[in-house]
Amino acid sequence: MSKTLWTFPVPSNCIYTGVRLILEKASIKLIFDYYDEDNDDKVFNGQIEFKNVIAHRHTTEKFTKFIKGTYDNLCEISESEWLSNLEKLSPEWAGINKLRHYAIYLDSYGLYEFLAGDYEVGDTKRGSKDE
């Protein structure tokens, strides 16, 4: 079961130059840019930062076991088998960080999943992420 936390600003098939993951200590940023058909096809960029990450995984669309609700949506996955298995390895540490399972599926890019303590959606800016 999943709970929607945030919705991609446009259909993800409007991603412009791709998706990038940047790992910095215990944080991972999922950076993207897209063109907005409803705004004269102007290009914008944004990011989602996952904090206190203990694990992440990515599967391409050809090999993804789809998680209901994640298409163009950042979701929190309840009753996560993946999280449950890792919590058993280190229950004290998992409890301190209040870990949650986050997932988002982006068209043509696949499923991105994170076991993390929290997340933050960054401000949207005009232009490509590469500018």
Image (cartoon, helix red, strand yellow):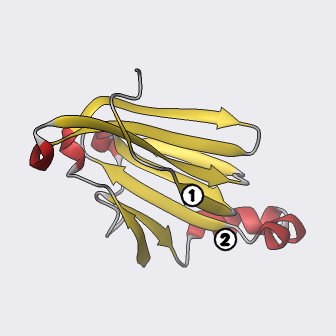
In this view of the protein, which residue sits in the foreground, 58 or 127?
127
Crowdedness near tag 1: few (<14), some (14–19) or many (≥20) residues, C-alpha within 10 Å: few
Tell me the SS state at disc 1: strand
Q: Residue furthest top?
A: 131
In the rendered structure, which amino acid carries the disc numbered 2?
Ser
Q: Which residue is mark 2?
A: 84
- Does 67 sit left or right of 29 as displayed? left
Report whether 18 appears left or right of 95: left
Horizontal side, residue 122 vs residue 85: left or right: left
The relative height of residue 101 versus residue 50 in the rendered view (above or below) is below
The kind of secondary structure element at disc 2 is helix
Q: Are marks 2 and 1 in contact (CB under 8 Å)?
A: no
Residue 59 higher or lower than 81, as above or below: above
Instruction: Give the image location of residue 46, x and y in percent.
Output: 42, 43
17 up-or-down from 6: above or below? above
Q: Nearer the viewer, mark 2 or mark 1?
A: 1
- Reading the image, the residue beneath label 1 is 120
- Residue 119: image quadrant is bottom right
